[in-house]
Image (cartoon, grey):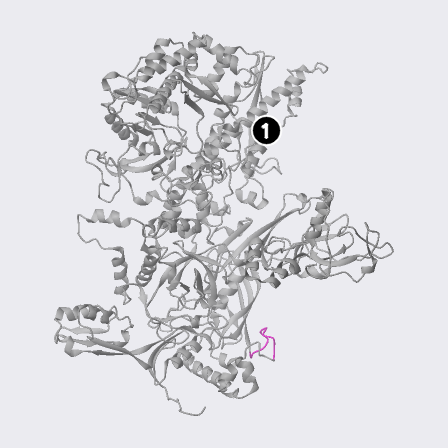
Amino acid sequence: MGRKSADSQEELRELFRHHIESFDHLIDSGRSVSGSIRSNVQFALSAASSLGPRPQVFTPIKEQLLRSIKDPVYPFECRQAKTSYTGKFMAEVCFQYDDGAVIRDKLNFGQFPIMLKSKLCNLSGADPQKLVACREEASEMGGCVREDQSSMSVRVYYLRSGSARLGVWIKGREYLLPVGVVLKALVDTTDREIYANLTCCYSEKYGKGKGVVGTQLIGERAQIILDEVQALSLFTRSECLEHIGEHFQPVMEGMENKSYSVVADSILKDYIFVHLDNNHDKFNLLIFMVQKLFSLVDQTSVPDNPDSLQNQEVLLPGHLISIYLKEKLEEWLNKAKKLLQDEINNEGKSFDFCSLAQVKKVMAKNPPKQISSAVENMLKTGRLVTQTGLDLQQRAGFTVQAERLNYLRFLSHFRAVHRGSSFAGLRTTSVRKLLPESWGFLCPVHTPDGEPCGLLNHMTCTCRITSYFDSQGKIRDFFKIRMSILSVLVEVGMSPSLPKLVQAGPPEVLSVLLDGRIVGSISASVIEKVVAHLRRLKVSPTSGIPNDLEVGYVPLSMGGTYPGLYLFTSPARFVRPVKNISIPSSDEQNIELIGPFEQVFMEIKCPDGGDGGRRDSFPATHEEIHPTGVLSVVANLIPWPNHNQSPRNMYQCQMAKQTMGFSLQALHCRADQKLYHLQTPQSPLVRTSTYTKYNMDEYPSGTNAIVAVLAYTGYDMEDAMILNKSSVDRGMFHGQIYQTETIDLSDQRNRSDRVQSVFRRSSVDKSTHSLIDSDGLPYVGQTIKPYEPFCSIYNEVTGATRTMKRKGSEPAVVDYVSINVKNKKKLQKVNIRFRQPRNPIIGDKFSSRHGQKGVCSQLWPDIDMPFSGGTGMRPDLIINPHAFPSRMTIAMLLESVAAKGGSLHGKYVDATPFSGSVKEAKEETESKHPTSLVDELGQMLREKGFNYHGVEVLYSGVYGTELPCEIFIGPVYYQRLRHMVSDKFQVRSTGTIDQVTRQPIKGRKRGGGIRFGEMERDSMLAHGAAYLLHDRLHACSDYHIADVCSLCGSILTTTFHQQQKRIREIGGLPPIKSSKKVTCHACQTGKGMEKVAMPYVFRYLASELASMNIKMTLQVSDSAGA
Amino acid sequence: MEGKSYQRFPKVKIREMKDDFLKFELRDTDASMANALRRVMIAEVPTMAIDLVEIEVNSSVLNDEFIAHRLGLIPLTSDRAMSMRFSRDCDACDGDGQCEFCSVEFHLRAKCISDQTLDVTSKDLYTADHTVVPVDFSDPAADDSGDQRGIIIVKLRRGQELRLRAIARKGIGKDHAKWSPAATVTFMYEPDIRINEELMETLTPEEKRSWVESSPTKVFEFDEDTQQVYVCDAEAYTYDDEVIKKAEAMGKPGLVDITAKEDSFIFTVESTGAIKASQLVLNAIEILKQKLDAVRLSEDTEEADDQFGELGAHMRGG
């Protein structure tokens, strides 16, 4: 058991790894952050200030009460104190004066949030025992932020004239540059060379054969491009640079005084192909892009689909924080520079730049702590406060709270990939489509219904994200990796691109791109061998080729994707393992990690023994490990999803995340806002292999209920279900909600009495003493009813006591009180955890694991339930047979039969999907007896003397007579969902009203009503229910008796007579007779005053209109129709 | 109530009797009678169960309600329950454990002081009344009763403590399942199986064998020596009609005729241990009689109207 659980721990950790690794990388590679900033801040006085070697983040430690002891803070403590889990963030700032010595100064940038279980976390590397000791979950996995995809931002445009433009995004605006100018500006080259390079992909001898991308038009286009440059009278590289610099200088900040060529250089460096640092590479890549563009225009290749996973990467939390941090640091440095400059320019003061103390004084105006608070704020709100936009398509919604409603929901948060909230508003549905490219990487089943459908996806259980760390946990040296790949490529016959030679195009040779850099070309005749060779090296651990290298070989085709060999080593790509069957190697040496780009062009077969309809000319080179690898973890927990109608599996993926399960094992040390907890969960009798793999028994989420499928009382119609009252009495589906209230006296609104408030109960008012102890806090174990006080706060200045009261409609039990003793003098902060018992009642929601949800409509007495003559069993739960025909959840029926058989035989039943197809393939050689699943399950029942089909003869519990037909009955794993009537019911007779309209307010929390709206009104009218209509819309709403002056017809001019004491209107009741005293202010008489009942809003409308100079006149008369 | 008398004299024949198990035949009555008996046994025979728990100290991992619920479900020996009073009817007290007529008080004090986990079980419940104690499930035949420590209530770790006072009251299963003395009560109609021997003889031995095997339970047997099919255990038949369907599928409808005897039932009673299974049946009959008495006594009275509401007039023959 110990060993087994350790294994499943490892499997689980694998699911969370990408989050932690990306954060670790952020911490480790502060260098890359600071390195790119350095050049940015240069001073007029030839003094430079830049950020030092690397910003450092320290492990979280307690604020030092005693100097010498460094006490680590654990996440548990932060959770209780409701603070962030942070570590100190330090960075060195260097000053250099006139090329003199560099002065380094360490600055504290505040507290930086730390991801749980990352390298800096105090729990990193802790084993389960230690975690339990630190009051954490034994299987704590860590991670905290969600991911997002994003794209690159250089575009090439084709003009109708035949030319091309390069689109560059600078500060949120796009600028179009003629390609020719950029090409010439990048390297010293001749028109001849550019022409040759551009036209190399066309050769007359291939005509329109397979794999040809160039057409004869390319020559003309190249000519146009070159003519364009000439028209601008730019001939040399320096002229081109001048040209670019001249146009971009106003846009570039801090470059006002630089020469044009310097500006152009920085444009080329910072905005065009930023991933390449060599201008020759940029030149080659631009040529390649233009060729591809022309090929697209000529329809010799198809466009890449930006919505397909093939061309996407993941934005991981660590990367997001690092780019955000980089921008914030830049901002800070720029501001510091400005401050210093202002100080220097301010001639009135004597400012010695060389005095560190004075510099520091100036810098104090620009507090460094704002950086870490900005990061923390970003994590809290998910909003990026940025000017540039960081090349991301959205500004907000970057974080979601990892709710621990149940374990599956928690886990899914870390496996989710969102397409970006900018797509959510789009009218088109194309981005939401499930494309075949995402096969094996994104789960086709696990996506929510409705608004985020298809945008919020979940990774499959086998899918991983490449990271900066190799399998040993060491940081990868990408330069070294690229060099070794290059040397391998050259060995097998690639002609490198470096000695600049004009190379031929696609039908003959294919370009090789490594991480977006053209490294050379390979002859089309040997490329297949090269690819196979690379794949072989990939899986061998000693080759120096990383195992997650993506070998995207796009073969020659007739107008297909633009051919070439695209290699990727970068992090944040999706990868998944498949078996490479072309390698004859034994054991685990043939598991290859493939990416979504290469997958499209690979031949991967299913391990069912068939060839998947493949032709002999394309034999399968790879094989899936197991078909369940295409499903997410949650979808993998559904028993036999392959027997269900597919939307039902989607519903179950949703509902599995809403179940009230065993959310936490360390429940007693948690201070979460709200936690749902099932008292006596069970392990499902029918389970998939994934269930055991991830050891879901640690967090079970349901009960094996005996389910009978029959229409028994009518209370089970329309998806309602009947629960056996005795089963509920015995503890079935019992649960609790834990709610924590944090009371922080130092956080109270009123600044003046914040110091004087303490927890203490009143010595005068003894009525609360039964609920509140002498320390002002409740007794643990005390039941607190709604609107009863649970804690009392004493104001030391005024001597008044204030009590906090429970809201809601249900009593709760005080489960736990924790106090914060950080402030030694007085107790200021407490957590009080309440426990609400939530045993099943009518209206609670339940569901099986097959998207069959229902509401409990009755708790039916045990004796009235049908019973089995043989065993005497009464069902725990009755559902209606109509739940099946239209929904076709066959797996639920199978589960019932299998669980019945399993419980009779005393074993769990394996319900792994598609296992039949795998098994058959293996068994085919041995025996020719493919038994169907139903046969297998039926046989189990038959052996124990039960009906083969899972039906039983039941007797009516009321009459004791045999029911007219046999009833399908058996155990099904049922989940209790978190939607409970106790949280939802809404009832009101009278209560609070709106101040303006005097109509009942809305909102369950405030005791409001439910709106009787226009459509309800329409139906009342249609039925002619006039009295009811009047009752709802008038009598029970804003009934009002107004005084109307029949002379002038106004309801607003009413005044009460001076001598008369004012009588306040009470509610809807008419005021005490005082008609004589009411006068019309306009007519100066009370003669024509009449009482008219009307909705109060009508009066309000009259006054609103009056404010716009519109008078409303009422004609009051006695007889109808007069 | 004139006219024909429907009075019958049901007979009971006990087949098998253990402390917590009883199997008997009930003859010469009808389904309504049999089902009434079943329903009363499950829901209306009174027992004792812990109903009120006052927790003094609970530092265990389970919360107060959970422990109280678990305590309630522990079966208590309730032979005295029939003669006790419901605490709501008790004049002597208000059911707080002070009165011997309606309630029994229990105490539980457990604290773990060793490093080993301490199991708090039903054996740790102490009471002054020896007639109402947690049911002892240890097998008297097996001597090593040291291991058998009753029903586990909670497990305690070092330093954890549980101290409480619990009051057991009389109640019925209708109110809460914890008062139900029956684990299972079921009955079936006695089947009457007649094999059409003439038609049976037309079958080959293989056909006979396969027909016999078509029943999931062992109702029929095929004698290899005599090549005859005979009924070996009629009561094993679950009215699943499998053999009839099989016969039809073989083209021999009417091969066997199975009917349920309308007036003969086979009861299986399993007790939770609160009272003996035999006593459970007797108590049930007693309660059934009391209920019928209540109906008879209220005949033709004004109360009858109140008691039965709209049915009152109907019951008086109106």
Classify residue B20 as left or right of residue B110. left
- What amino acid type is highlighted by mark number 1? Asn
Furthest toward the front, the residue is A1122
Q: Is any part of residue A351 visible from this angle? A: yes
Residue placed at 32% from the left, 78% from the top?
B189
Q: Is any part of residue B16 visible from this angle? A: no
Q: Position of residue B211 (x, y in %)?
A: 19, 70
Residue placed at 34% from the left, 15% from the top?
A198
Find numbered disc 1 in the image and state the secondary structure of the residue it sits on: strand
> In front: A150, or A907?
A150
Region in magenta: B92-101
Q: Position of residue B118 (x, y in %)?
A: 47, 60
> The numbered mark 1 sits on a residue in which chain?
A
For residue A73, what is the image quadrant?
Answer: top right
Q: In this view, does B106 lie above or below A1091?
A: below
The residue that label 1 is drawn on is: A108
Classify residue A569 as left or right of residue A35. left
Dot 1, how many residues are within 10 Å of its Cα: few (below 14), some (14-19), or many (20+)? Answer: some
Q: Is residue A734 a member of the stretch shown in magenta?
A: no
Classify residue B222 as left or right of residue B12. left
What secondary structure do most residues of the magenta stretch adopt? loop
> In front: A644, or B69?
A644
The quarter in which the C terminus of chain A is drawn is bottom right
Q: Where is residue A34 in the image (x, y as percent from the top left)?
A: 51, 24
Q: Is residue B99 a member of the stretch shown in magenta?
A: yes
> In front: A533, or A826?
A533
Q: In this view, does A784 lie above or below A159?
A: below
Residue placed at 55% from the left, 63% from the top?
B163
Q: How many labels does the image show?
A: 1
Q: Where is residue A408 in the image (x, y as percent from the top left)?
A: 44, 48
